[in-house]
Image (cartoon, rainbow, N blue to C red):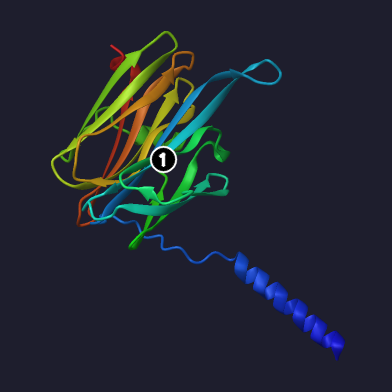
């Protein structure tokens, strides 16, 4: 009898442990417009050559990521956030605010870091304040077979895109400026393509929803030692009715750096 009770106890403990390890189902709805606040991500990778432990030059892409928290009503004063990031290898990393953060706020989550698979798969943001809000975004990926689908000109009736640059001896610094005449939800990802058709992630913005334009992002570096040929842009633009317009364009870097 005692042996039977022992096994029942072991099974019960195991079931409790397993249930505690199962994540609560996440609401992976793509929120187009949250009337109270905006939470968006800015991803800024840079690729260059570094010396490895064998004193040989090798390519490396390192990522910076920022979360921007903005109140659209000025009623929300502070929140706690949790951000779950899944990379291209399926590995999940969670970032949490260490204490309630004031709104507006910009926090850097990733600094000069290698990412598994050299890119992301999805992002899930939970905000806890007077009311709780969730935001879900899928990363916009590109493959070598997709590069022929991109047009040689960026044309849009919804947004205006300007790309300016400065340079020094080792790199170009691109500034992206986006303007719009209405409140839109923007998800976009850019890539650099080398002359050997190798693909490198570049600036990405996910979940931007704010009726104050322009959106301006600086410090996007292209190192001259890398043989980059094209800048590819993939924009997903949503109006408040959820209607989606997708723009795929490419820019020859030699035309940009005139």
Q: Quadrant of the C terminus?
A: top left
Q: Is residue 234 left or right of residue 118?
A: left
Q: Is residue 225 left or right of residue 140?
A: right
Q: Is residue 226 above or below residue 245?
A: above
The quarter of the image holding the N terminus is bottom right
Of all residues, the one furthest to the top in this rendering is 169
Q: Quadrant of residue 68?
A: top left
The secondary structure type at the circle numbered 1 is strand
Residue 142 spot, x, y in % from top left: 43, 38
- Is 246 situated left or right of 170 in this image? left
Residue nearest the viewer, comparing 152 with 227? 227
Splitting the image into 4 quarters, where does residue 131 fall? bottom left
| Total count of labels | 1
The residue drawn where x is 43% and y is 41% is 141
Relative to 226, say whether 80 is above or below.
below
Q: Which residue reaches farthest bottom? A: 1
Q: Position of residue 238 (x, y in %)?
A: 24, 49
* Residue lying furthest left: 181
Observer-nearest of 252 and 159: 159
Name the residue: 57% across, 40% down: 116
Rendered view: 130 above or below 158:
below
Mark 1 Cα within 10 Å, few/some/many (few <14, many 20+)?
few
Residue at image position (19%, 38%) is 213
Reading the image, the residue beneath label 1 is 107
Residue at point 13%, 41% (across, down): 181
The image shows residue 229 at horizontal and vertical percentages of 40, 20
């Amino acid at each position: 009898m005692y042996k039977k009770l022992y096994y029942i106890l072991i099974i019960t403990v195991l079931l409790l442990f397993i249930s505690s390890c199962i994540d609560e189902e996440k609401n992976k709805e793509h929120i187009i417009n949250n009337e109270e606040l905006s939470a968006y991500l800015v991803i800024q990778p840079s690729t260059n050559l570094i010396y490895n432990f064998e004193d040989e030059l090798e390519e490396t892409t390192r990522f910076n990521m920022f979360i921007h928290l903005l109140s659209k009503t000025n009623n929300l004063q502070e929140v706690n956030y949790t951000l779950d990031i899944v990379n291209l290898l399926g590995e999940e990393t969670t970032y949490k605010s260490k204490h309630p953060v004031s709104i507006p706020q910009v926090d850097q989550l990733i600094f000069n870091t290698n990412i598994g698979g050299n890119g992301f798969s999805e992002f899930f943001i939970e905000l806890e304040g007077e009311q709780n809000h969730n935001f879900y975004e899928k990363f916009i990926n590109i493959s070598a077979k997709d590069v022929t689908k991109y047009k040689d000109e960026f044309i849009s009736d919804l947004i205006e895109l300007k790309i300016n640059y400065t340079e020094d001896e080792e790199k170009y610094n691109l500034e992206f400026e986006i303007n719009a005449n209405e409140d839109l939800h923007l998800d976009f990802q850019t890539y650099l393509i080398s002359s050997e058709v190798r693909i490198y992630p570049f600036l990405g913005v996910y979940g931007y929803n704010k009726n104050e334009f322009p959106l301006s992002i600086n410090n996007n570096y292209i190192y001259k030692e890398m043989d980059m040929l094209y800048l590819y842009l993939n924009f997903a633009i949503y109006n408040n009715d959820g209607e989606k317009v997708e723009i795929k364009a490419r820019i020859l870097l030699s035309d940009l750096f005139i």
